[in-house]
Amino acid sequence: MAKVVVGISGGVDSSVAAYLLKEQGYEVIGLFMINWHDTTGILEGDCPWHDDLIFAELVCKKLEIPLHTIDFSDQYRHRVVDYMFKEYQHGRTPNPDVLCNREVKFDLFLEKAKELQADFIATGHYCRKEIIQINGMDHYRLLSGSDPDKDQSYFLCQLNQKQLAPILFPIGHMLKSDVRKIASRQQFATAKRKDSQGICFVGKVNLPEFLQQKLKVREGTIAEIPKDISIPNKKPSPGKDISPGELIELSKPLPFKNLDHKIIGKHAGAHFYTVGQRKGLNIGGKKEPLFVLSTDTDNNILYVGQGHDHPCLNRYALRIQRSDVHWIREDMKMLTGEKRDYLVRIRYRQPLQKATLYMQDNNMYIVFAKAQRGITPGQFAAWYNKEELLGSGVIV
């Protein structure tokens, strides 16, 4: 009988994943991870892990499977949270959930599973895996979840073939509604529990307060860029090949400090904000909502503009340093000078966007068919061939 260690989070998805694996004849072991103890900045009533552990214990008792608990909090702080603080300090917006999967759930967790002599590990992610053979060797394809409203493949965009090899995704082919029906039929304590929100393993947080653990409050100015401003042409010519020089120009952020603007308020630190952010500016009296267009952390200036269609909020291209380009399917790597058409998303739950990828000596450039709102440095762009996630990289 094959042994599988399931990451039991205290939520409905991992509960049903464990149940399905047991029904399929696996020897199932639950593993609950404690990755965060500090409650600073966490919203009242959103306990980081205590309540989750109680629900995990109830589910494992119901399933009559053992539950192990392990504390990864030191490693999580070092690998995920410290990186997160550093990125915000430099005006970039990291994605801790992507890092958490790469560094903790499918790295430290995998090592612990090996100690328990597991043949496989499993999670409640809404995504799928397929094994194909190329030249007699196994290759693992990471596919979108069947439920279009719950697809979580984006969060796994930094995994590699070694990490994918032992993974099972028992609910990746299911709809969320069907998962809840199974949980209800089995009378799991998690059946009606709400999905977790906020930062992976930390919970729902007041982000500025959370970041103030390490980032200082620095009063700065908020500068508004008028909506009718004339900006350099940043739109690619349709149907034409784009030269390396044009790629550089298309992907460059606008020179905000040189654009017309007026000071309209104060903020507590540009590093507490992110491109596209609407809430937290505390400035009223405008015809349209204000959005963050850019954060200048060197000079501590926040550039904002009215309306989600502000010309400075939408861009056609982005750049990823070649050293930050990651391929899940290494056999699909692009060569220097090559270009390919793929589907791309730059944030979780964003509908896939048509785009062309260009690989140059030191950078990859992604040029979209339509302008994209809020391209954010520090976030991950992930590219797909139909339903298969091929790779990802950090936006510059």
Image (tube, rainbow, N blue to C red):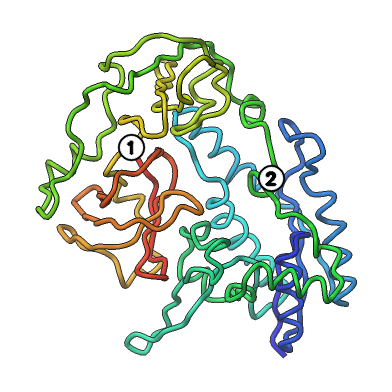
SS under mark 1: strand
Residue at coordinates 45% horizontally, 28% vertically from top-left? Answer: 291
In the image, 375 versus 120, the foreground residue is 375
Residue at coordinates 23% horizontally, 63% vertically from top-left? Answer: 340
Residues at badges 1 and 2 in contact (C-beta under 8 Å)? no
What mark, if any, has residue 123 been given in the picture?
A: none
- Say which quarter of the image contains residue 24: bottom right
Q: Give how far across and how far down residue 253 sits, in percent.
A: 29, 32
Q: Give how far across and how far down residue 335 sits, in percent.
A: 20, 62
274 in relation to 142, above or below? above
232 in relation to 17, above or below? above
Give the residue pinned by disc 2.
74
Q: Quadrant of the N terminus?
A: bottom right
Around disc 2, counting alpha carbons within 10 Å, would you say few (fewer than 14), some (14 to 19), or many (20 or more)? few
191 in relation to 269, above or below? below
Q: Give how far across and how far down residue 314 sits, in percent.
A: 33, 37
Q: CA distance from mark 1 to mark 2?
A: 39 Å
In the image, 62 versus 139, the foreground residue is 62
In the drawing, does residue 375 fall left or right of residue 157? left
SS under mark 2: helix
Q: Amino acid at mark 2?
A: Asp
- Say which quarter of the image contains residue 61: bottom right
Residue at coordinates 82% horizontally, 39% vertically from top-left? Answer: 45
Q: Quadrant of the C terminus?
A: top left
Mark 1 or mark 2, which has the lower sequence index?
A: 2
Around disc 1, counting alpha carbons within 10 Å, would you say few (fewer than 14), some (14 to 19), or many (20 or more)? some
Q: Amino acid at mark 1?
A: Asn
In the image, 199 versus 160, the foreground residue is 199
Q: Give how far across and how far down residue 346 sits, in percent.
A: 41, 49
Give the residue pinned by disc 1.
314
> Viewer-nearest of labels 1 and 2?
1
